[in-house]
């Protein structure tokens, strides 16, 4: 009984979650984001996020974790730190101003095919008696500098369990939780968690030209990210 | 007590299973500690953190042949070159910017713009 209760049942549940986690069946990348397959952008310029959360640090966390997952997805990602520094030197300190800059300017100056805009809606660490969670709510868009079309967008929330306790947060949250629990760290190393969250957010993006699956992942099933539909 | 051990072992085994099931055998690029050191240097800018970041990038470049692509990650040469530039080493910076566009033609316009700016600034100093 004890074995069944402590090992067999949790293992079974765990496996079920994983199986669904690896292959969710809701929409295909090709039907969700047809324009990105048409236009085939090679490079992405990451703009600093608009931080609408209460955490002042969210912007830095985000900026230091966004470059890698986009690059691993197969795109040329412009050097994030260098770009943000140069923009400051050019007198653009204000993210709001940056978000109003005509897209053609970014093509002209950087040669970027597409721009990543991000709104951080929520970046909260909630401490509770039995659990603490990091909740990341993000709205991201990749917009073409040539056609001004939205090529990809993501709206969603990832809950990362910081304590190994009980939490929700959808498939992404569950996977993040599994990793966190297994690592079994008590101290909150947020960069690690932020990266886990970011990687999950980006998993719906059709892969870029440096990825082996380039233009072959239209049928890959993803969780529907556009609840407005 | 023993049950606890079995439980932990089962979880560990499952975790390994996930990793092998979902993860790629080799990453497309190698980053080493870049993300962590970048964050630490962003949060607390000290000479020590800066040097750590620089070292992590140099190490990532050194280890790049072990990655799936065999290439240095996008932006790595450029970001590192920019750090060299801030330290006043224009020569090392320029060579990094050149490497960035050699590996990634997408960066050509941006790198050429920066290279010409550096060259002009260097000329002014002489």
Image: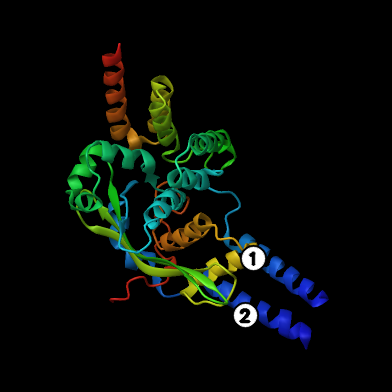
Image quarter hosting the C terminus of chain B? top left
Q: Residue furthest bottom?
A: A1
Image location (x, y in percent) of residue A139: 32, 64
Image location (x, y in percent) of residue B56: 54, 38
**Is A37 rendered above or below residue A177?**
above
Q: Residue at x 43, y 41 (%)?
A: B74
Task: Report how far apart the C-alphas of labels 2 and 1 lie in the structure.
Answer: 15 Å
Determine which residue is flagged by label 2: A13
> For numbered disc 2, what is the local secondary structure?
helix
Seen from the viewer's position, the closer of residues B24 and A161 is: A161
Q: Residue at x 38, y 72 (%)?
A: A224
B126 left or right of B18 in image: left
Is label 2 or label 1 in front? Answer: 1
> For numbered disc 1, what is the local secondary structure?
helix
Image location (x, y in percent) of residue A226: 32, 72
* Residue B80 in which image quadrant: top left
Q: Residue furthest top?
A: B126
Determine which residue is flagged by label 1: A182
* Residue B96 in which image quadrant: top left
Q: Residue at x 51, y 37 (%)?
A: B57
Instruction: For label 1, count other residues whose C-alpha is less than 10 Å away and answer few (under 14), some (14-19) or many (20+).
Output: some
Image location (x, y in percent) of residue A151: 28, 58
Q: Are marks 2 and 1 in contact (CB under 8 Å)?
A: no
The disc numbered 2 marks a residue on which chain?
A
Q: Residue at x 30, y 49 (%)?
A: A47
**Is B27 rendered above or below residue B66?**
below
- Whether residue B102 appears in this view of the structure is no
**Is A169 rendered above or below residue B55?**
below
């Amino acid at each position: 009984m004890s074995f069944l209760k402590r090992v067999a049942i949790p293992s079974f549940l765990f496996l079920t979650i994983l199986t669904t986690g690896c292959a969710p069946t809701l929409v295909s990348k090709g039907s969700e984001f047809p324009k990105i397959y048409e236009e085939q952008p090679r490079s992405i310029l990451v703009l600093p996020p608009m931080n609408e959360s209460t955490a002042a640090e969210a912007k830095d966390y985000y900026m230091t974790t966004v470059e890698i997952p986009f690059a691993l997805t197969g795109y040329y990602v412009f050097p994030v730190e260098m770009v943000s520094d140069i923009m400051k030197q050019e007198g653009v300190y204000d993210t709001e101003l940056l978000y109003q800059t005509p897209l053609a300017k970014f093509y002209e100056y950087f040669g970027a095919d597409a721009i990543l805009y991000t709104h951080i809606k929520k970046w909260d660490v909630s401490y509770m008696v039995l659990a603490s969670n990091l909740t990341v709510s993000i709205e991201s868009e990749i917009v073409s500098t040539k056609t001004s079309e939205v090529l990809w967008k993501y709206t969603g929330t990832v809950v990362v369990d910081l304590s190994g306790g009980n939490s929700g947060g959808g498939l992404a949250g569950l996977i993040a939780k599994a990793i966190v629990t297994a690592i079994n760290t008590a101290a909150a190393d947020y960069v690690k968690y932020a990266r886990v969250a970011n990687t999950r957010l980006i998993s719906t993006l059709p892969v870029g030209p440096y990825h082996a699956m380039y233009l072959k992942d239209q049928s890959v099933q993803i969780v529907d990210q556009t609840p407005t539909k | 007590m023993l049950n606890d051990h079995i439980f932990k072992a089962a979880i560990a085994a499952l975790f390994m299973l996930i990793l092998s099931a979902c993860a790629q055998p080799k990453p497309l690029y190698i980053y080493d500690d870049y993300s962590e050191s970048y964050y630490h240097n962003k949060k607390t800018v000290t000479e020590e953190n800066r040097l750590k970041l620089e070292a992590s990038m140099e190490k990532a470049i050194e280890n790049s042949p072990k990655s799936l692509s065999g290439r240095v990650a996008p932006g790595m040469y450029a970001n590192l070159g920019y750090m060299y530039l801030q330290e006043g080493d224009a020569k090392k910076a320029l060579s990094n910017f050149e490497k960035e566009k050699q590996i990634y033609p997408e960066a050509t316009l941006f790198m050429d713009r920066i290279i010409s700016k550096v060259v002009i600034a260097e000329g002014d100093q002489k």
